[in-house]
Image (cartoon, grey):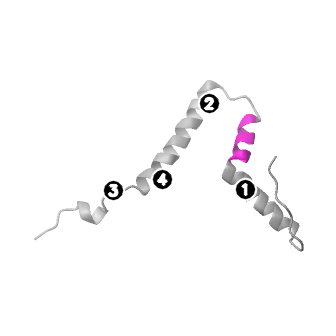
Amino acid sequence: MRGVNVKKGEPVDRALKRLKTKLDTEGILEEMRRRRAFETPTQRKARKLRSASKRNKIRWRFSNAPAASAEAPAEA
């Protein structure tokens, strides 16, 4: 089980925020929510398609695609 050590004089709210951030980055909370109820094969396929779509949008945004101004032909 994951955890964080509360530093001396540190507010509990700050420690909880660090814990939540750690769990989010590792994907533990998402997996726990997903396993809470049975997921049919159709639901699993739809979830994977949604996550793939998100990944592809991010990849496309940061790809080495030419800029919009470079695509337009220059008028002389």
Q: Tag 1, which secondary structure? A: helix
Q: Residue at x 62, y 30 (%)?
A: 43
Name which residue type carries label 3.
Answer: Ala
Between discs 3 and 4, the one toward the N terminus: 4
Q: Position of residue 64 (x, y in %)?
A: 35, 57
Point out the tag, 4 or 2, that comes first from the N-terminus.
Answer: 2
Q: Is residue 60 above or below residue 76?
A: above
Q: Secondary structure at mark 4?
A: helix
Tell me, yes or no, whether the two marked residues, 3 and 2, touch with CB atoms within 8 Å: no
Q: Is residue 63 magenta?
A: no
Pick whichever of labels 3 and 1 is earlier in the sequence. 1
- Give the residue displayed 61% in from the left and 25% down from the top: 41
Write down the quadrant of residue 20 in the picture: bottom right
- Magenta segment, prevailing SS (helix, strand or loop): helix
**Residue at mark 1:** 22
Residue situated furthest bottom in the rendering: 9
Image-based side of 68 in relation to 31, left or right: left
* Residue where numbered disc 4 is placed: 58
- The label on residue 65 is 3
Q: Which mark is residue 8?
A: none
The answer to which of 57 and 24 lies nearer the viewer is: 24
Secondary structure type for disc 2: helix
Q: Quadrant of the C terminus?
A: bottom left
Residue stretch in magenta? 27-35
Q: Earlier in the sequence, mark 3 or mark 2?
A: 2
Q: Earlier in the sequence, mark 2 or mark 1?
A: 1
Q: Are marks 4 and 2 in contact (CB under 8 Å)?
A: no
Question: Which residue is label 2 attached to?
Answer: 43
- At label 2, the amino acid type is Gln
Please tell me which of labels 4 and 1 falls first in the chain. 1
